[in-house]
Image (cartoon, helix red, strand yellow):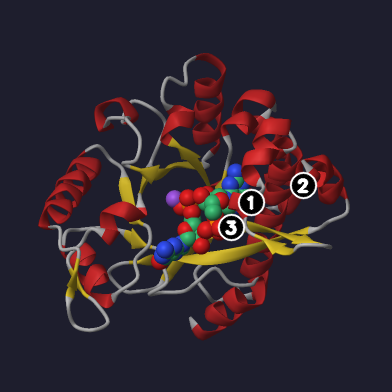
Amino acid sequence: QALSSTLRAAVERNEFALEYQPLVGMEDGGVRGVEALVRWNHPQFGTLTPNRFIGLAEEDGSIVQLGRWVLATACRQTRRWQLDHPDAPPIFVSVNVAVRQVWDSDLVADVGAILAETGLAPHLLQLELTESAVMGSAGRPLQALQSLSDMGVRIAIDDFGTGYSNLAYLSRLPVSVLKLDGSFVRGFQYEGHDGASAHPSPADEVIVEALIQLAHRLGLTVTAECVETASQASRLRGIGCDTGQGWLYSRPVTPERISALLTAAC
Ligand code: G
Ligand code: G
Ligand code: MN
Ligand code: NA
């Protein structure tokens, strides 16, 4: 495939860029952190979003190089924000990590080296893994997660609720954050643009409330993805959700836009 054969070279040619989407405290609406989201500025095809190339990168193994670049760039940028905005509370960065990065590379050594090089505090780095990446992660992957957690790096489960993991099992892993899949929030009853109720599903809200309570009792915090309306946000706040992410707060934006937010915050 045309894209695949050029992925590795594209990393070397510096054709990738990161956008950042704010993660907001539900109580006060303050920016706590940002999720780094990669884009490929392809010389021929223009800006490509990750769903066009992450799968290929996982297949051909170039995700290891790309993932290293993403981690280093995100950590460097986050340290930069901290230095440029000493009066704003420091924000953390949440970086997506593919299964193969845990299996086929020394993620612990990479993260250690990147933190040392950038000077970013470990607690300002969060790694997002999918349920399938951590489920049944015996042996080496589990050891890697444990070492990262021991370093002070937070592990989050991305798209939580779409797979088959159960909380009892997850609570025994070094995981501290659940990112609730967007499909739950989408199922919340809300007023559509025309005032009509779009796909009301009270069951989703009941399930999410129970999940949040259980997560809290197991020592996990919960981030809701795809928060698009004020009504969804107030319902999530009402049932104790810790952090929100979504178009209501901000789309993924350039590092300069995050800087502007931090300037406004102090
Ligand atoms: O930004 P967008 O909504 O297009 O992202 C689509 C998907 O790509 C998301 O599921 C996200 O987790 C994934 N993704 C974005 N950036 C990265 C990255 O740097 N590494 C990996 N492995 N996945 C990413
Ligand atoms: O799988 P992951 O959670 O990493 O994917 C993040 C993706 O979700 C990003 O590509 C981002 O563009 C997208 N996203 C973020 N906020 C919203 C939102 O409020 N609504 C929708 N539909 N997508 C969102
Ligand atoms: Mn994610
Ligand atoms: Na997600």
* Kind of residue sitting beneath label 1: Arg
Identify residue for label 1. Answer: 52
Give the residue displayed 52% in from the left and 74% down from the top.
88
Q: As rendered, which of 43 and 170 lies closer to the eye? A: 43
Nearer the N terminus, badge 2 or badge 1? 2
| Mark 3 touches mark 2? (CB < 8 Å) | no
CB at disc 1 and ligand 1 closer than 8 Å: no
Task: Establish whether ligand 1 lies closer than 8 Å to the Cβ of label 3.
Answer: yes
Give, as a three-letter code, the residue at label 2. Leu
Secondary structure of the residue carrying numbered label 2: helix
Does residue 215 appear in this view? yes
> For mark 2, does the 10 Å Cα neighbourhood hold few (<14), some (14 to 19), or many (20 or more) residues?
some
Front: mark 3 or 1: 1
For marks 3 and 2, give the one nearer the viewer: 2
Image position of 144 with respect to 219: above or below: above
Report x, y in % for residue 183. Answer: 31, 53
Mark 3 to mark 2 CA distance (whole Å): 22 Å
Name the residue carrying label 2: 3
Residue with the mark numbered 3: 36
